[in-house]
Amino acid sequence: MIQLPIRSQDVLEGLSAKRSLELEQLFGNGDLIRALNILGISGPFKVQSPWELEDELGRHLINAGGYAALPFGESHPELITFITTFLAQNQSMSLPQQSVTAWRAALETNLVSLLAQHAPSHNDSQVFFSNSGAEAVEAALKLAKAARPKASIIINFSHAYHGKTLGALSLTPNEEYQDPFRPLLSDIQTLAYGDANAFEQTVKDIGADKIVAVIFEPIQGEAGVIIPPPEFLPAIYQVCQKYGILMIADEIQSGLGRTGHWFASIAMGLEPDIITLAKPLGGGMVATGATIARKWIVKKVLGGIYGKRHSNTFGGNSLTMAVGLKSLELLLDHKLVERSKQLGIQGLGRLKQIQETYPGYIKEVRGAGMLFAIQLRHVIKPALIPGQAELIRQLGTGMALRILHLNGLHVCYTQNSSRTFRLTPALNMPEELFLEMFHRLEQTAKTNSKAWHMLGKTSPIRLLRLAKLAFEA
Ligand SMILES: Cc1ncc(COP(=O)(O)O)c(C=O)c1O
């Protein structure tokens, strides 16, 4: 008889940290786990409170990780209570692909209403649900292409991050992620983020009728929290309005409060045609993505008998819809969007102070709401090892993640800026923990007042193991 090596009860009773690590290395994304393990930051972590973790050695950590997808931290009691009630009482189908459901109807209504309250022209928008941010971007791409069938070019921006499925990856101009998968989608024009003149000139050169859409992050999260010059996006909006080029605002990271606004693009005065949301919509508990678009655009793909032209199995399932509904409510009822803005200002002030005190460790800091970026100094001058600049950046950040961990801080790596780490604390993190988070960062900077000091604090064996791993593939 076939047997499962591990039963769910075994995990409930507690699989040891050592065994989990071995199994992950054997059967999961082994080398990534190996790298984290060499750095001593692989966990597994226990959740102590929504905002605090404990590592396998009992070390206390403030959770500033979660990649902006944990608006309420881990397993927030209010959300858990709601989900438990939902599971106990819900009688609607879980996968209502061919039917109406109250949960999906409610979340669609609330998302459009929320959007229309910020941008009235969105009154008649419609929502398409999927299972991740990248999938929400895929849907946006398909909607835009179908809405302007005579055009073919999509404009994106340098350092953008839109996900790693093939379509979304085509819009994520990072060689490390793109190179092994070429050819990707053709007809993508990547322009400098922040340069409105380049955009206007490109539209003139190519011809507006050939351009389907421009996709942008109102604040670039994975580039290291890059806030564009204030005139940049409004200028692009003007051009798009004039020529009918569609605007796709990717608000997967910036939206729903993280940067201090419900929709960062709308706060900048834009009314994009298509908006993507994901991360916090799942309340940090479930995977969900939403693509919100004007009705005439949705009709071009899903109109009439074509209602299944774009679809997925799990998008819009009742559990994720219920969690999405509750997450919007929690954001609203606890005024977390406003809180993000206010604490964001305070936090950025602290970061600037730390940077000014320890400029040999931190090169630059940036922030928008409760999305903070810390750009490190190099641990070794890249010129010393020609051709290995990226490796040096990754090594430096790896060491910083380790030392921050030792000082009780769990932070996020940044996909398109390997010298930058981010703090993405829960929007409801208690103020004393929020302040303690900066204190722990300050302590780390103090004991490593020059970035290269971290080298001396990382054992040669650890460094050798990291170097070996880096050159193995
Ligand atoms: C702006 C933006 N778009 C898309 C994505 C991709 O989302 P996911 O990782 O859920 O596929 C991310 C993820 O970080 C993101 O920040």
Image (tube, rainbow, N blue to C red):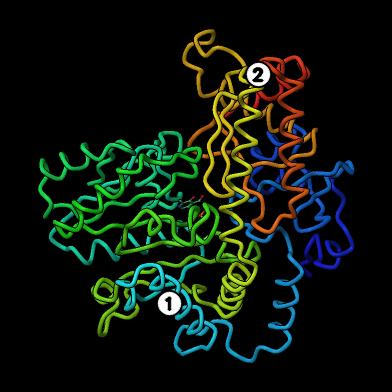
User: Extreme top residue here?
Assistant: 384
Q: Label 2: which residue?
A: 451
Q: Nearer the viewer, mark 1 or mark 2?
A: 1
Viewer-closest of 42 and 180: 42
Is the shortest distance between ligand 1 and the CB of mark 2 under 8 Å? no
Q: Is residue 463 left or right of residue 271?
A: right
Residues 335 and 400: in front is 335
- Where is mark 1, residue-wise? 113
Classify mark 1: residues with Cα within 10 Å, few (<14), some (14-19) or many (20+). some
Q: Give the image location of residue 467, x and y in percent.
A: 64, 21
Quick check: is the Cβ at mark 1 less than 8 Å away from ligand 1?
A: no
Is 380 situated above or below 170?
above
Residue 242 placement (x, y as % from top left): 14, 57
Tell me if 402 is positioned left or right of 176 in this view.
right
Q: Tell me the kind of residue under disc 2.
A: Ala
CA separation in Å, label 1 and label 2? 48 Å
Specify whether residue 395 is in view: no
Q: Amino acid at mark 1?
A: Ser
Give the mark nearest the N terminus, 1 or 2: 1
Place of residue 239 in the rendered image (x, y in percent of width and height, measured from the top left): 18, 51
- Of 117 and 362, nearer the camera is 117
- Is label 1 in contact with label 2 (beta carbons under 8 Å)? no
Image height of 126 relative to 451, above or below: below
Secondary structure state at the residue bearing disc 1: helix
Say which quarter of the image contains residue 405.
top right
Task: Indicate left or right for 411 with 215 as reference.
Answer: right
